[in-house]
Amino acid sequence: MTAKALLALTLSCAFVSTGHAALFEDDEARRAILELRQRVDVLQQVNQRSGDDNSQVRRSLLDLQTQIETLRMEHAKLRGQNEQLLRDVAELQRRQKDIAQGVDERLRQFEPVKVTVDGLEFQADADEKRDFEAALAVFRAGKFADAKTAFAGFVRQYPRSGYVPSARFWLGNAQYAAREYKEAIGNFKVLLSEAPGHARAPEAALSIANCQIELKETRTARKTLEDLLRDYPQSEAAVAAKERLSRLK
């Protein structure tokens, strides 16, 4: 019930009938009216304060909801940023791994590797291995002029390489194929001088004799074959040397 309604009800009760008016004096009536007005004012104030309080509560609730929604949006934004950071970190780690693997592979290309050629085991740089194999491939393709150039260049570029005795052997064979017998004899003799225990040494000695036979140096060739039989009696080249000697007699 509102204050105005209460006031109206009170006033109506106060003046229900003129028969009862005599029960009250004028002063008492005025006091009663004033008291009623005061009560109405108090009720209005209470009602107003209650309305103000309700409005304040509603505003507070709205503010709280706004703050909650703002926090929810910020949390979602931060979560998205965190997920992006995790993806970025994963991508960086993958790229770092790829770069490290690439660096390792490039470094391995420059590291010496263990190789075995003609029964000789040694350490060789990747460039040495590549160049020797390339020159040998040219020789096996029958390109003897190119093979001479390749093996001669190899010996000059890698004078201390473990490949050198084999490179000299194939260089001599390329020269022999090109009918450069004197040059071939020179390379074969260097091989025998520098590496007499090399697996290709018996063949080099036999090749010297063959070059000498081509040059019609029969006596010198016979001496070379006899030395081969003495120095490498168990070699396969010694078998061929016996056959050559039998034909030279």
Image (cartoon, grey):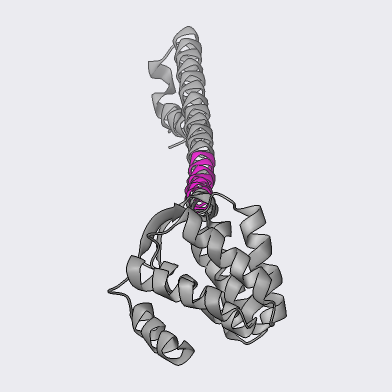
Predominant secondary structure, magenta span: helix
Q: Quadrant of residue 225?
A: bottom left
The residue sitting at the bottom extreme is: 247
- Res 131 visible: no
| Residue in the foreground of this view, choosing between 249 and 195 | 249
User: Residue 115, relative to residue 136: is it above or below?
Assistant: above
The residue sitting at the top extreme is: 27
Name the spot of residue 102 as percent of width and height, x first.
53, 55
Name the spot of residue 56 as percent of width and height, x first.
51, 29
Is 81 inside the magenta-drawn segment? Answer: yes
Is 189 inside the magenta-drawn segment? Answer: no
Q: Residue at x 45, y 92 (%)?
A: 247
- Quarter of the C terminus within the rendering: bottom left
| Residue in the foreground of this view, choosing between 4 and 240 | 240
Name the spot of residue 124 as percent of width and height, x first.
48, 54
User: Residue 206, relative to residue 78: is it above or below?
Assistant: below
- Res 59 visible: yes
Q: Residue at x 59, y 78 (%)?
A: 212
User: Residue 243, relative to residue 22: is it above or below?
Assistant: below
- Quarter of the N terminus within the rendering: top left
Q: Which residues are magenta?
A: 70-94
Name the spot of residue 101 as percent of width and height, x first.
48, 54
| Residue in the foreground of this view, choosing between 131 and 62 | 131
